[in-house]
Image (tube, rainbow, N blue to C red):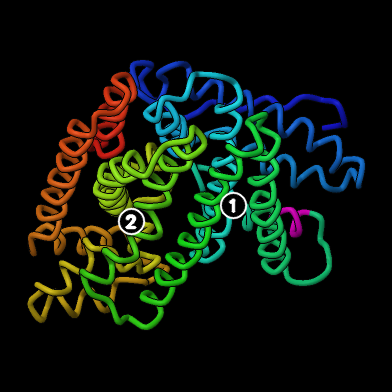
Amino acid sequence: MTAGVHFEHLPTAAIPIASPLDANDLRTRVQHCIDDFLNRQSNLLLYVSPDTEPLLESITELLSGGKRLRPAFCYWGWRAAGGPDNPEIIRAASSLEMLQGCALVHDDVMDDSATRRGRPAAHRKFANLHEENSWLGPANRFGVGAAILIGDLLLSWTDEMLLTSGLSDEAIKRGKKVLDLMRTELMAGQYLDLLIQANRDGSVEKAKHVIKYKSAKYTIERPLQMGARLAGADDHTIEALSDYGLPLGEAFQLRDDVLGVFGNPKITGKPAGDDLREGKRTVLIELAVSRAHPTQLKALETLLGDENLSQDGVAELREILVETGALADVENMIETSTQQAITNLESANLNQQATLILTDLARAATARVE
């Protein structure tokens, strides 16, 4: 890659064209905004040094996939508040993919995940680069250091992309207040997630609290509110979007937790049972722990968090999650929270097209993936 050469984004995960994520050609437009932004950043980084090329390649690869949920909810929050369809809101909404990229890279470091979307996680990729070139020092330390810097760079670019979106200064000031709040909540939620895994002082209620700040607000409620505030929404509209976004955000993360244990690696991009190896103290796990008989509890304590957990171990833990009724209860929680979100939305009296798309997004974000 050289200065002036344009990025080509990689194919995204297979999602039907009829997906509400593609309404108004949203994902294609978001990708174009990301590509354009990275093209401009490439000239600066490569001017600093051609040695930054691997950083650019890693970021480009990371930002070439994904559902674009946060930009979608930001955009439809804007439309729900009466904002028009224009390039400026697409650029502003796309800035949330920079924040999501930061969160993914840092999350993979914290969890020491081997893969992300079927490819080596950033810290593993740079550790491999170190080893391939026989550089000095520990390869893993180099990989983690590079990944931290990539995450920091993406966090910085979140602001830059929003501030250069073309929206008015007043609109950006309103939206950035929500963005700042969202980032603080996310980092606090991430820490609580780390803490529960470390001290094993978990419970269903604590797991739900982590969901609220690490995922529900970050993925759905705050992006919706950010888009609405950018459009100048009043407090009544913001509250209505929250009544939809919070229960849906909880359902979304519960579905993600189920997929982290029972999902198809070809779809999730992570090895089967990876969340079990990482010892994630999810609602699904905490429900099983609270109901397990002594033999099951011993298996949970022994196998959960085992980095070398075999497929037989994964199968044993899955069986416990089914036998204790934890899986069935989480599925019921997903259905109940999703329906609550849709019901609240239907009574909110928002823009009609936005209401229809947000209803479809609720179902798409929480659907079972076979």
Tell me the residue that label 1 is attached to: 102
Where residue 89 sits in the image (x, y, percent)?
A: 55, 28
Q: Position of residue 64 (x, y in %)?
A: 58, 33
Residue 149, percent from left and from top: 71, 58
Question: Which image quarter is the N terminus in?
Answer: top right
Q: Main secondary structure of the magenta part?
A: helix
Q: In front: 101, or 305?
A: 101
Q: Mark yes or no: residue 170 visible.
A: yes
Q: Residue at x 15, y 51 (%)?
A: 333
The residue under the point 57% across, 59% down is: 106
On the image, numbered disc 2 is attached to which residue? 273
Considering only vertical position in the picture, is 18 above or below 185?
above
Specify the amino acid type for callout 1: Cys
Relative to 189, 351 lies left or right: left
Q: Secondary structure at mark 2?
A: loop
The residue under the point 42% across, 47% down is: 222
CA separation in Å, label 1 and label 2: 24 Å
Badge 2 crowding class, 10 Å Cα cut-off, few under 14, some 14 to 19, many 20 or more, is: many
Q: Tell me the magenta residue range.
A: 128-132
151 in relation to 54, above or below: below
| Numbered label tally | 2
Query: Helix, strand, or loop for circle 1?
Result: helix
Q: Is residue 211 left or right of residue 30?
A: left
**Residue 72 included in the magenta stretch of the image:** no
